[in-house]
Amino acid sequence: MIVLYIYGEEAANMAVNKRRDRHDIVAEILNHAIRGKTKAHITYRAKLGYNQLSEYLPLLVEKGFLQNMTVEHGKQTTRMYKTTQKGIEFLNRLESANKLWESREPLLMK
């Protein structure tokens, strides 16, 4: 889960109007696939278009952040995507970076 720290009304307004960057989109996909989800579920939950998600999924599988699984229910098979340990590591590191970025501690200059 990604935590964003927003200070004041101006920052809140900026956050509402901000477009998501590539890292935000990847984090959304990985967060929603932690327990294994279908492409349709990830598309809906991450608020992405089908074509946009279709660009990210193969890349995340290739890089080892997602695992592509086939689950059988009787005669029906379902393709699911699940966040790997490497993907969880990415989420943790991104969360740490966001916390550093948002911290209000003064910079030490020498």
Image (cartoon, helix red, strand yellow):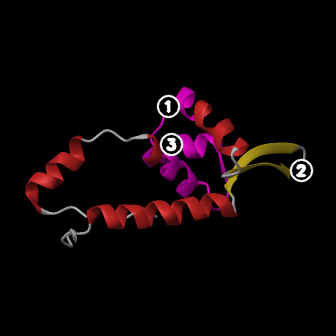
Residue, disc 1: 49
Residue, disc 3: 44
Residue, disc 2: 74
* Tag 3: amino acid: Tyr
Residue 37 shown in magenta: yes
Q: Which residues are magenta?
A: 24-53
Numbered circle sitting on residue 13: none
Between residues 3 and 97, which one lies in front from this camera angle?
97
Where is residue 47? Give x, y as percent.
44, 41
Task: Indicate the quadrant where residue 84 lies.
Answer: bottom right
* Tag 1: amino acid: Gly
Task: Indicate the quadrant where residue 109 lies.
Answer: bottom left
Using the image, determine if residue 84 lies above or below residue 68.
below
Q: Main secondary structure of the magenta part?
A: helix
Of all residues, the one furthest to the top in this rendering is 51
Where is residue 12? Give x, y as percent.
17, 54
Q: For mark 3, give the secondary structure.
A: helix
Q: For mark 2, give the secondary structure.
A: loop
Dot 2 crowding, Cα within 10 Å, few <14, some 14–19, many 20+: few
Dot 3 crowding, Cα within 10 Å, few <14, some 14–19, many 20+: few
Gap in angstroms between the C-alphas marked 1 and 3: 8 Å
Q: Quadrant of the C terminus?
A: bottom left
